[in-house]
Amino acid sequence: MKSSTTQTLIFTVFLLLIPTSFAAPPKLKDSFTQCVTVFKPSVPIQNFTYTQQNPNFLTILNNYVRNLRYFNGTTRKPVAIVAAAHFTHIQATINCAKKLGLQLRIRSGGHDYDGMSYLSTVDFVVLDMFNLRAIEIDPKLDTAWVQSGATLGEIYYNVANKSNNLRGFPAGICPGLGAGGHFSGGGYGNMMRKYGLSIDNIIDAKIVDANARVLDRSSMGEDLFWALRGGGAASFCVVLAWKIKLVPVPEKVTVFNVETIGNRGVIPTDLAAKWQEIADKIDNDLFVRLTLSSSNKTVKASFMGMYLGNSEKLLEIMNAKFPELGLNKTECIEMKWIDSVLFWLSISPGTSPTSVMLNRIPQKQIYLKRKSDYVQKPISKPGLESIFKILSENENVSMAWNPYGGRMSEIPATETAFPHRAGNMFKIQYSSNWFVPGEEAASDCLSQTERVFEAMSPYVSKNPREAFLNYRDIDIGKNLNSTYEEGKVYGVKYFKNNFERLVQVKTRVDPDNFFRYEQSIPVHVSR
């Protein structure tokens, strides 16, 4: 095993070997640097602006790249990266990008699966939000203001410590997710059946719009505030901060992870069938995710859950509603809610301090592809057997089935821009990871993902085949010409009937379409 020093040296050399492909003309870089300086932000911007000539440029760019497919010698690099440390840095970046005809990419945590927060086919600037990560918790522990660059790990850690483990927040299970993008796409996690999505618990926001104005909910208007919650804020503005409503969590939660390969006296397809019957209807305090993966032509079904209460009550519920799983006392682990965050990362209880969730830079980077689907009708037993077969033939692909129901079914589809509410039994995430560069490995994993995705088409939503914005997927459509028609192709999949209202909001607040990217909300051009 290499030492950390050796690994760091190798990675540094790797960075130096990556050319800054599609380099922008020197005059353009110089013009941008001069422009943001001329705007004289309240805090000097020079030390937070990185052009391709800066020795730290590639390191800053790579720090928040979470998919190595989009960090190589063929991907276009930004003209500059502005690691904003003050709202006036954002204002200057917007004004200068508009003046110089540069597109803007906004990055809070870098978890955009298809890299749209740090990629473009034309000259662009990355507005990196990682310096803007303040978290201010109300003394009454009811609310908090969190800046867009704050990660979920930082939010969870601070909220738990400040509240003496009496408060939490419903959001994702990955601590490295940035609040800016995660919240604006919806933000789901293992408390959504109890409390809904992150956006269902956001009560205000501070933004910088296309005219570089700083606005809050009152001054931006309810239409734009509606659009920011689930519609993808990067189509409309830069979010500075969110005001979130904290939720109560019990002194102890109970977690479990049961892996089955026909080893519990029940055929895995039978367990999956039973899971479908109960997962979206069971107690709202209980979330049970089903993950399907395969190895050596054998499919493994893993049931990972969290109950907002003690193990005794959990076992009572499971024995009544899902006795087939055979969950027993020894498989149930009681812990503080904050400790459960580590459990969902497969970190064994007691082996790491909760402060590890504050780590921003992952220990390793991977190549990946993700896709999504929604299931609205139970999949038949023959259908499940067919799914298990296709997974056994494509072992680089796994599926996570995330149950809906509970609070998710109570909130109207038009309450926020996020439309996937009542009528959905569960959401699917397709995952494929690989660890070596090269076209051969990528082609194999991408082909396997596509085969599984196509095989699932009889069992998922139709007209449109719905998709989840936070699981960004360029395969479902992209807007190369900034047209309404192109935007509608992916727009109705992400937003269903809310798409037209999003277009109306976009056309009103950003008529020049400054905030645009490959899957942004288009403007409606009058003819």
Image (cartoon, grey):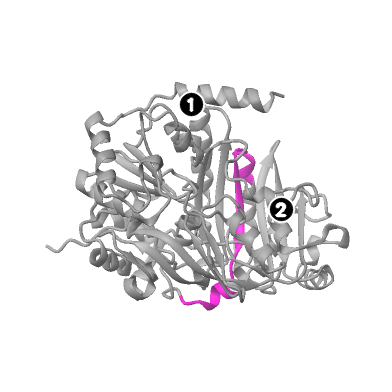
At horizontal 36% and vertical 45% (from top left) the residue drawn is 45
42 sits to left or right of 193: left
Q: Taking 49 as reference, is 334 above or below it?
A: below
At horizontal 41% and vertical 26% (from top left) the residue drawn is 73
Kindly indicate whether the residue at mark 2 contacts the one at mark 1 (C-beta within 8 angstroms). no
Count of number-bearing discs: 2
Residue denoted by label 1: 15
393 sits to left or right of 181: right
Answer with the quarter of the image where residue 142 lies.
bottom right
At horizontal 54% and vertical 67% (from top left) the residue drawn is 197
Q: Amino acid at mark 1?
A: Leu
Q: CA distance from mark 1 to mark 2?
A: 31 Å
Identify the image quadrant of the N terminus: top right
334 sits to left or right of 344: right
Identify the image quadrant of the C terminus: bottom left
Q: Position of residue 134 (x, y in %)?
A: 52, 58
Residue sitting at the far right: 330
Q: Position of residue 239 (x, y in %)?
A: 40, 60
The local secondary structure at tag 2 comes to: helix
The residue nearer to you, when weighing 7 against 140, is: 140
129 in magenta: no
Q: Taking 85 as reference, is 511 above or below it?
A: below
Question: Magenta residues, as a range?
Answer: 389-412
Asked if residue 463 can be seen in this view, the reply is no
The residue nearer to you, when weighing 380 against 257, is: 257
Asked if residue 264 can be seen in this view, the reply is yes
